[in-house]
Amino acid sequence: MARTTPPRPVDVEALFPEVAAYRREATRLHPRQGEPGVRDSSVGGPLLWPTNEPWPHCVDAHPKIGFDPRLPIPLIPVLQLYAADVPGLPFPPGTDLLQLLWCPYDHEPYYAPRPELRWRATDISGLLLAHPPHPTGAPGNHMPAPCVVHPERVIEYPQWDLPEQLSDALDERFDRLKKETGWSYWYDLSIAPGIKTGGYPGWTQWPDWPDCDSCGKRMDHLLTIDSAEFDGGSARTWLPQEDRPVVGTIFDLPYKQRHAIQSAAALMIGDMGGVYVFICPRCPGQPYAYRSDCS
């Protein structure tokens, strides 16, 4: 079933033409638990991985947990995206598959899982790895449940990334809109919550964009791995139409039914936080970096 984000309740650019220059396209992935295969885009599903390619492992210390688990630790699949499903992704030449793995233990400096990216071509010949190694005893809230995805393109405007001077200039009009209509620019009109590609990072604190080590320029946001599809502030306008109950709100549903929509991947990064991955499309090999924050 497709997932459809409702249109914004007001015309953002008509009310606030100053933000039009900052509009960006994002792809909401809308993960829902299922049984994805290696030829499917997925969150937490199996990866298309050749048997002759070593499985990546982590050999770092993990200071927050108070002990070092048995090393090395095999990384776990977090995200797999085929170009045909997410055409807006900046795939390097000769590739059409993006894979993200991470070590499920906390890492400095963010005390969160540390991601690794793989770009590959899907014309893999030979045998595929059927049973990759799996860590034992790792934090369950960093081990995504297998989910199929329902990619959907949406338009975003900056939230925390709105330039400070512009934000100050618009504050009075934002407040007036909220008072007159009940709609909040910050929760209802700006950025889509949940796991997504493109658009703006789903920061819960002040923005912390990385610069590329090679060229020194600010990197581009590639994707956000979020703890939830929505929260109490964003559910009203960002919850897909197909997931809306006939009577009442999503928060009136039994916990298990709501949780299957809100937290299908069963992830929790800190306290309702996220991991944000950035790339530099200008430099060879598309260097990447990550950030993480939480409430």
Image (tube, grey):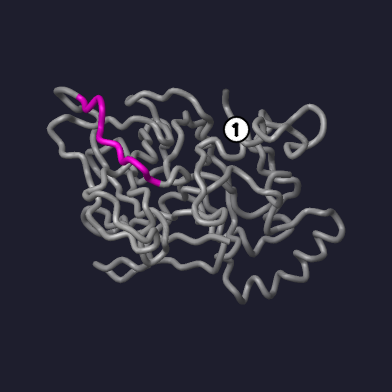
Instruction: Look at the image and give the residue range highlighted in magenta.
Output: 128-138
Does residue 185 appear to the left or right of 78 in the view shown? right
In what element is the residue under mark 1?
A: helix
Quadrant in the picture for the N terminus: top right
Q: Amino acid at mark 1?
A: Ala
The chief SS type of the magenta part is loop
Quadrant in the picture for the C terminus: bottom right
Q: From this viewpoint, which residue is outermost toward the front?
A: 67
For residue 61, above or below residue 168 = above
* Residue 38 image point, x, y percent: 32, 26
* Residue 271 image point, x, y percent: 56, 56
Does residue 214 appear to the left or right of 64 in the view shown? left
Give the class, few, some or many, for how many residues have Cα within 10 Å of label 1's Cα (few <14, many ≥20): some
For residue 229, above or below residue 243 = below
Q: Nearer the viewer, residue 215 or 98?
A: 98
Measuring 25% from the left and 51% from the top, which residue is drawn there? 58
* Residue 285 image point, x, y percent: 22, 53
Measuring 63% from the left and 72% from the top, which residue is drawn there? 166
For residue 222, above or below residue 97 = below
Measuring 24% from the left and 43% from the top, which residue is drawn there? 93
Report the residue marked by disc 1.
260
Q: Nearer the viewer, residue 228 or 16?
A: 228
Q: Which quadrant of the figure has residue 243?
A: top right
